[in-house]
Image: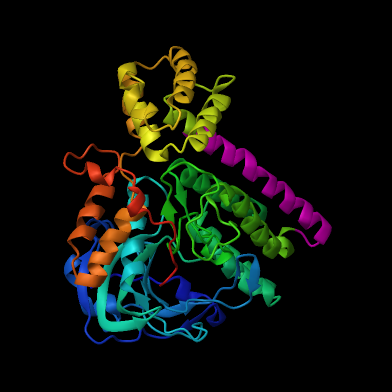
Amino acid sequence: MIPFANSYARLPERFFARLPPTPVAAPRLIKVNIALAEQLGLDPDDLTADTLSGNAVPEGAEPMALAYAGHQFGNFVPQLGDGRANLLGEVSGRDIQLKGAGRTPFSRGGDGRAALGPVLREYLISEAMHALGIPTTRALAAVTTGETVARETALPGAIVTRVASSHIRVGTFQYFAARQDTDGVRTLADYAIARHYPGVVGYKAFLEAVIARQAVLVARWLLVGFIHGVMNTDNCSIAGETIDYGPCAFMDEYDPATVFSSIDRQGRYAYGNQPRIAVWNLTRLAETLLPLLDDDEKKAVEIAQVCLASFGKTFEAAYFGGLRRKIGLLSPERDGDNALVQDLLKAMAENQADFTLTFRGLCNASVKPERDSAVRDLFTDPSVYDAWAVRWRQRLNLEIASPEARHAAMRATNPAYIPRNHNVETALNAAIARDDFAPFEELLAVVSKPFDDQPGFARYAAPPAPTERVSQTFCGT
């Protein structure tokens, strides 16, 4: 029996639509995250194909689709909501949601279903992000439905069971603000504070806390080369987790202008734009909270502006602190440290150096200079790296930590393995075209241990060959 405790279901009825998942024809269990199940106190034997497809609603669940709005590529849509997702309830304080569970009142003409490829992508990348230490929703299970979904072509249907601290989004606040429902905004804010920020007192402190979590989250994305791809306000979690893995990907060569999303034609959500967009999204949150910040609108705006101004300092501390650790600078910051790492990034961008391999290669190069070749060969002009490395080693000589301690610290922050897009596509295509999940399982196992050397799996660390490149990803769910 799954021990549900459903606090969101105690909120006013206008916060959601109660309805069960739509049953599917022939559910088949293809993956259960046993480790996550055990962390949640669940018995894996209770996680059956019927339960995880919505064909059997577990005792104690109170299934519902959540209401929210959102800015999509800068354009406000006053009602979005869970058009294909069904929140069963909460276990150990975390939401259990079936994504792809059928039509809801928020489907807006959609079929409410998900295709197998996007389900496996979300499973792979969310678990990889967790292994990288980045706050994220997680995947508890994936099932196929025995049905097809119509996208560009007929594709096998699937459902992913998503686990999240909650599914409250910036767009959830916008939903009530757009209706001038200040009581709804207040009720939601009080609930979010109690659930996610129990030490916070007051709405100003709540806004500051959300801003701080988002600033650190986006910094962590940049530190591993991650591009969310669709940073709409409805994909911005109040809990500070990465949520909604649609057209997301990890960079190969370092380029701040990198875009993978097929629908992001203007580069709004490019890798280097993500901090700016986070502030834009948080500004939309602040707008919804103005009536709670002060009765005087002018004073409320001034309070919100002060809160938003804190993003930059928090982000820069997390981002540059992370970059310094990535190049082995573990002692307190010295003058010139940030310039040193920025010069490396500039050289990488100008020389098409692979982001992940460059930083991983620096781990060994920091201890054994003769291993520089593994890094310098990544640069189209190796002399640019050589000139930078002279300055880097001079700075390393000022570190107190031993070379061995520095090496260990660098390996713990610079992954060897990320879910490179060409490998993800290979695994997904095998599952879709041949019902072959072995490549998915192997890739999942590799990216679940991103900092470990894994003999025999070097191909997963390598960048794509020119013929393997995948330059676009799609929402597709």
Give the main secondary structure of the magenta stretch: helix
Read off the magenta span.
Answer: 294-322
Quadrant where the C terminus sits is bottom left
Residue 317 falls inside the magenta stretch: yes
Residue shown at the point (43%, 36%) measured from the top left: 353
User: On the rendered structure, is 79 left or right of 164?
Assistant: right
Residue 189 position, x and y percent, is 59, 64
Q: Residue 184: in sight, yes or no?
A: no
Residue 32 position, x and y percent, is 22, 64
Number of numbered callouts drawn: 0
Looking at the image, residue 114 lies above or below residue 73: below
Task: Depth check: give the residue in front, 188 or 114.
Answer: 114
Residue 181 figure quarter: bottom right
Residue 266 position, x and y percent, is 61, 59
User: On the rendered structure, is 2 left or right of 177?
Assistant: left
Residue 379 figure quarter: top left
